[in-house]
Amino acid sequence: MIAEFEGDTTQLAKPADEPVNRDTNGSTLTDLKIVDRVAHIPLVADGLVTFETVIKANQFTASLYQTATGIAAKSLDMASPVINRTQPLIAKADGLANQGLDMVEARFPYAFKATTDEIISNAKGIYDQRVGHLLPNEVVKRVIEQIYELKDRLAATGQAAGGQVHSISTGIAEQLHKLAQHAEIPASTKEALIAAYGDIKDIVGKEESTAQGKATEILHYVQSKVQPELERLTNSVFKQKGQAVETEKTS
C-alpha cells in the first residue's frame, strides 16, 4: 500500500496556479506599469535614492530597513496565488491608473520631466520674486528695534560702571553702521546714519568725560538726531511692506 502511494507521486502535487514572475530571491513580482512610471519621475527617483541613502547610513535604521524589505518580499511571495487569480482585475486597475496619469502628465508635463535641481532653482526664483524682497525690510526693522533696546538699556544704567556704558554705547554705534550699510536705505537716511555713527564713536572716545556724562550725551543725541531718522525709516519700511502685500494679493 505504501509502495503504491510512493509510486503515484502525482497525488501529492499541489494544483498549479497560473505562472508567476519571480526574481532571483523567489519573490513574487507584479508587472504594474503605474509603479514603474511614477518611480522614473526625476523628483520621485531622486527622493527614493536620498531616502535609501539616509536609511542605510545608520546601522540601526539599515537593519530595520533590511528586515522590513525581507518581510515585504516574503508576504508578497505568500500572496502570489491570490495575486495570480486576481491578475485581470489588477491589470484593469493598472490601466485606469495609467490613463489618469496620462491626463495629469498632459496637463503638467514639466513635473514629469524636470530634474530636482531645476525644480528647486525655479521654486527659489519664484520665492525671491514674490517674497524675498520683503526680507530686507524685516532686517531693517529688527536693527531699528535693537537700537531702541540699547538706548533703553543705556538710560537704565544710572550709575553703572564705565565698561557697561562703553559696551552699550558702542553697540548703538555698530547697529547704526550696520543699518547704514543696508542697500534698501534711502540715500539721505544713509548719510544721516553714517554721520550719527561717527558722532557717537567720538562721544564714546572722549577721555575727559565720565561714563555717566557719555551716557547722558549719547541719549540726548539719539533722541534728538537719530530717533527722527529711525522713525522716518520705519514708516518707509512698513509702507513698502504694505504695498508689496497688496501687490501680492492682487497678482
Image: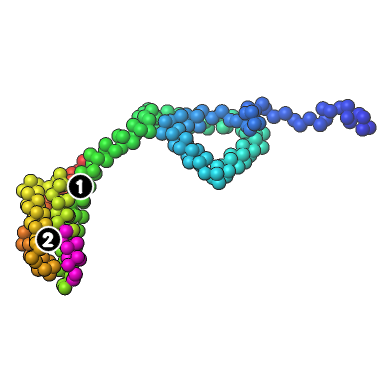
Task: Give left or right: position of 244 versus 110.
Answer: left
Q: Where does label 1 land, which residue?
A: 136
C-alpha span from label 2 to label 1: 30 Å
Image coordinates of residue 150 in percent, x first then y, are 18, 62
The answer to whether residue 223 of the structure is visible from this angle is no
Closer to the camera, 86 or 72? 72
Q: Residue at the far right: name it.
A: 1
Closer to the camera, 152 or 237? 152
Does residue 150 show up magenta in the picture? no
Q: Where does label 2 land, which residue?
A: 204
Q: Earlier in the sequence, mark 2 or mark 1?
A: 1
Q: Which amino acid, by three-letter code, is at mark 1?
A: Pro
At x 9% / y 58%, what residue is drawn?
Answer: 202
Tell me where the magenta segment starts and ends, as one range. Answer: 160-170
At x 11% / y 68%, what residue is drawn?
Answer: 210
At x 52% / y 32%, what residue is drawn?
Answer: 93
Query: Helix, strand, or loop for circle 1?
Result: helix
Image coordinates of residue 174 in percent, x first then y, are 17, 54
Residue 82 position by quadrant? top right
Prevailing secondary structure class for the magenta stretch in the rendered image: helix
Image coordinates of residue 104 in percent, x first then y, are 39, 31
Image coordinates of residue 20 in percent, x first then y, are 64, 28
State whether residue 53 is above or below residue 143: above
Callout 2: few (<14), some (14-19), or many (20+) C-alpha neighbours within 10 Å?
many
Q: Which amino acid, by three-letter code, is at mark 2?
A: Val
